[in-house]
Image (tube, rainbow, N blue to C red):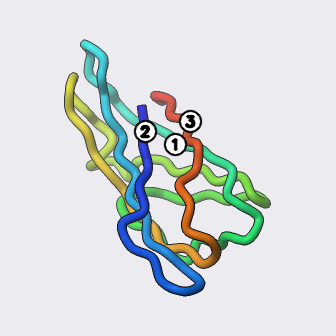
Amino acid sequence: MATARVTSSWQGGFQAEVTVANPGTTRLNGWTVTWTRAGDQTINSLWNGRLTQTGTAVSVDDVGWNGTLAPGASGSFGYTASGSAATPELTCRAR
């Protein structure tokens, strides 16, 4: 499961944090979070994840050290973007 929140915003841009959580009862060994970014948004930088973009489709994979989550544990990644500050509807899947 993944949730996003805007942590700061300024005219023309914002910073967001995405939390990936393992609510299950078994260890999670890798994750991918996907969403469709708003048409006026451009992701400028991303940390603690591996970013892939195709058009407005965004995909972020773990970077190894943060991919294994024990039951009840969570991890996060962040990004800065230009455009309107809005949290996307996320899809999260185990790999």
Disc 1 secondary structure class: strand
Q: Give the image quarter of residue 5.
A: bottom left
Crowd band around label 1 with a 10 angstrom C-alpha radius: few (<14), some (14–19), many (20+): many
Quote the CA–CA distance across marks 2 and 3. Answer: 7 Å
Q: Mark 3 points at which residue?
A: 91
Q: Name the residue under label 1.
A: 33
Q: Which residue lies most toward the bottom here?
A: 11
Give the mark nearest the N terminus, 1 or 2: 2
From the top left corner, tell me how far across and down residue 63 is, in percent. Answer: 38, 52
Q: Which of 18 and 14 is in front in this view?
A: 14
Q: Quadrant of the N terminus?
A: top left
From the top left corner, tell me how far across and down residue 49 is, in percent. Answer: 42, 57
Q: Give the image quarter of residue 82.
A: bottom right
Quote the CA–CA distance across marks 1 and 2. Answer: 7 Å
Q: Mark 2 points at which residue?
A: 2
Q: Which residue lies most toward the top here?
A: 25
Image position of 17 (left or right of 88): left
Contact check, label 1 and label 2, Cβ < 8 Å: yes
Image position of 78 (left or right of 69): right
Disc 2 secondary structure class: strand
Give me the residue at 20% from left, 26% from top.
72
Disc 3 secondary structure class: strand
